[in-house]
Amino acid sequence: MAAQIIDGIAFANQTKQDVAARAAALKAAGKPVHLTAILVGGDHGAELYAERQGDGCRALGIDYTLLKFPVSISQRELKNEIRRLNKDVGVTGIMMHLPLPDHLDTARLQYEIDVVKDVEGVNPANIGYVVYKHTLIAPCTALAAVELVKSTGVQLRGAEVVVVGASVIVGKPVALLLIEQEATVTLCHIATRDLMAHTRRADVVVVAVGKAGLITGDHLKEGAVVVDVGINRITLPDGTRKTVGDVDFESAKEKASWLTPVPGGVGPVTVAMLLRNSVRSAELLK
Ligand code: NAD
């Protein structure tokens, strides 16, 4: 079977249209969406990335403010900035560009972000809400992976799903979101004894590890839906550099029914989910 390719760029574009319509409705109701991003001591590349993010937001009718702080900012000062943004009724969403300098405790600062304004879904309370089936804001990459699985139309209720990679930001929330869909979820990680034994019986495989080519066609059941979250930069024999996922695309496409490419799969949808979460935060605050 030659897999159908799940087009992340098309999915992201559709999501952005929906985001623009919802942002316009909020603006018309006098409740504009306003995302504030925090950047600490970023180099030129980080600033450029953050500014491009601002352009992307404004194009959809989302106001965007980039707050830049010197690398010397203390934990207490940054915590107070976040608390100030939490209280500011004109700010509907807050996100922090990573990495932060080593002297700052990223997790502790993420815990400070108001749960409703937490557009990246990084406050642990937001994972707790997923567990209790009251999802407010889920982490963007996990949401992107799950949305792409759903976009294939696969029946998730009762499906065997294997998630490979158990990180806090991707693998674990993907597993929780799929449990919410009543799938039977197995979460594999570095200590899993026989990875192939698990993936081979899965109707859906989501891979988020960071190892190029970890999952091949041999790991898959015929007709599986495969979503590849991994992003790896590899050097080809001729010296050129290439971005690939964790799934060996060529062999996997002979077995899978649906497969995401890298690039052009989960990546653009993650960006779109940040925008969708931004609108959702503003709607929740309304
Ligand atoms: P991480 O390093 O935090 O976690 C990796 C997980 O993989 C761990 O749970 C580990 O136990 C597991 N693992 C490692 N080796 C394994 C093996 N041989 N077999 C099974 N499991 C194994 O990584 P992360 O932050 O979750 O990121 C994973 C990948 O997803 C990376 O390539 C990252 O660049 C990519 N990513 C992509 C996006 C996106 O927007 N597309 C966003 C975030 C992360």
Image (cartoon, rainbow, N blue to C red):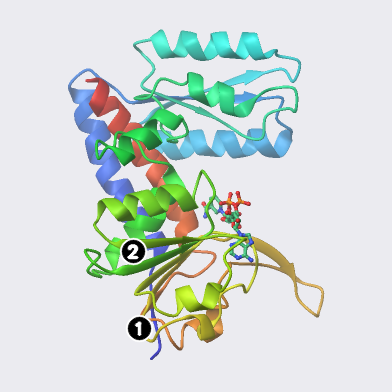
Tell which quarter ligand 1 is in: bottom right
Q: Residue at x 34, y 64 (%)?
A: 149
Residue 271, can we see it?
no
Left or right: residue 114 versus residue 170 is left
Left or right: residue 36 versus residue 245 is left
Q: Residue at x 61, y 72 (%)?
A: 214
| Residue at the extreme bottom of the image, as rendered | 1
Q: CA distance from mark 1 to mark 2?
A: 13 Å
The amino acid beneath tag 1 is Gly
- Looking at the rendered image, the quarter that the C terminus falls into is top left
* Picture coordinates of residue 81, whole percent (x, y): 55, 11
Closer to us: 104 or 192: 192
- Of the numbered discs 1 and 2, the one sitting upstream in the chain is 2
Q: Residue at x 65, y 33 (%)?
A: 47
**Considering the numbered disc 2 on the image, is that residue within a helix, a strand or a loop?**
helix
* Picture coordinates of residue 285, whole percent (x, y): 26, 21
Residue 264, can we see it?
yes
**Considering the numbered disc 1 on the image, is that residue within a helix, a strand or a loop?**
loop
Q: Residue at x 51, y 80 (%)?
A: 219
Circle 1 crowding by C-alpha within 10 Å: few under 14, some 14–19, many from 20? some
Left or right: residue 215 versus residue 4 is right
Determine which of the numbered discs, if any, sits on residue 177 in the image.
Answer: none
* Picture coordinates of residue 51, whole percent (x, y): 57, 33
The residue to which callout 1 is attached is 223
Determine which of the numbered discs, if any, sits on residue 149 in the image.
Answer: 2
Closer to us: 166 or 93: 166
* Picture coordinates of residue 178, whole percent (x, y): 32, 55
**Residue 26 quadrant:** top left
The amino acid beneath tag 2 is Val
Q: Is 216 drawn above or below residue 144 in the view shown?
A: below
Q: Is 256 drawn above or below residue 95 in the view shown?
A: below
| Label pair 1/2, CB-CB below 8 angstroms | no
